[in-house]
Amino acid sequence: MGPPPHGARGLGRADPDAVEFTVPHLARGVRSPFRVHTTAYLGRTDAINLNGFRVTSATRTIIDLARLRVPDHELTGAIDTAVRRGLSSPSVIIERLDALRGPGRWGSRRLDTLLVDSGGHTELERRFLRLVRRAELPRPRTQVVHRAGTRTVARVDFLFEPYDLVVEVSGQHGHSSPSERARDAQRRNELQELGRTVYEYTWHHVTGAEAYVARTFTDRLTAAGWAPRRALRSADP
């Protein structure tokens, strides 16, 4: 079986026409009309079969993209796409990165930084997670499915589970048609019937009014029973 092509196809903003190969160091010098990368180690979980071709897994591809110094926006796009499509997860990437990191392996520290706010399915969700971290708020669970019996009620962007608070973030255009607004209202009502309190922040709030989001949601978390760490420290004897 031949060496695996680079598995970036379909991840984030990857060029759909690009063909790249990763080969062992021992194969260095092999002539090819395509771009060829070399690696000292390709583990059993680093390659998968896709449509009859052996390609690097989404997790290994993301690690390789970091090593190849692609721009941050392309790397975060690849992470978000892999998470959204269920091809990888932040914890899986971190675990594999820890196994592969070593002297001279460029990109590990970049991934360490970018993975802190990963887990959202979109750039807007990633920005909200970054805002939460900077405000020193508890990290929420992401993309949590709520069910009533066997019926799916909703998949929510963020769940602050101990406090029964849900946060949804809406893009620049949002839902504007009557049918979309009706579905949104029904979804919100059913979540409330399940004991969740739902708040929404827009693209404008998350990207241009960070202080407002941090202040209002800190107040909402506190009212729900959350105690800021600063307050806990000041109360220590």
Image: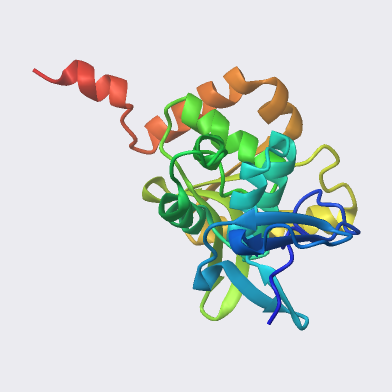
The quadrant holding residue 99 is bottom left
Towards the viewer: 13 or 148: 13
Residue 164 in sight in this render:
yes
Give the vertical position of 83 relative to 215 (above or below).
Answer: below
Q: Position of residue 112 (x, y in %)?
A: 49, 39
Q: Position of residue 95 (x, y in %)?
A: 43, 55
Towards the viewer: 193 or 208: 208
Towards the viewer: 127 or 50: 50
Q: Where is residue 59 in the image (x, y as percent from the top left)?
A: 58, 59
Question: What quarter of the picture does the C terminus occupy?
Answer: top left
Q: Is residue 34 left or right of residue 167?
A: right
The quadrant holding residue 226 is top left
Residue at image point 74% right, 33% down: 203
Question: What quarter of the picture does the N terminus occupy?
Answer: bottom right
Towards the viewer: 151 or 100: 100
Q: Where is residue 222 in the image (x, y as percent from the top left)?
A: 38, 31
Give the vertical position of 149 relative to 154 (above or below).
Answer: below
Give the vertical position of 128 relative to 193 (above or below).
Answer: above
Q: In this view, does 60 lie to the left or right of 71?
A: left
Residue at image point 41% right, 37% down: 138
The quadrant holding residue 205 is top right
Residue at image point 61% right, 67% down: 153
Residue 169 in sight in this render:
no
Q: In this view, does 82 lie to the left or right of 17?
A: left
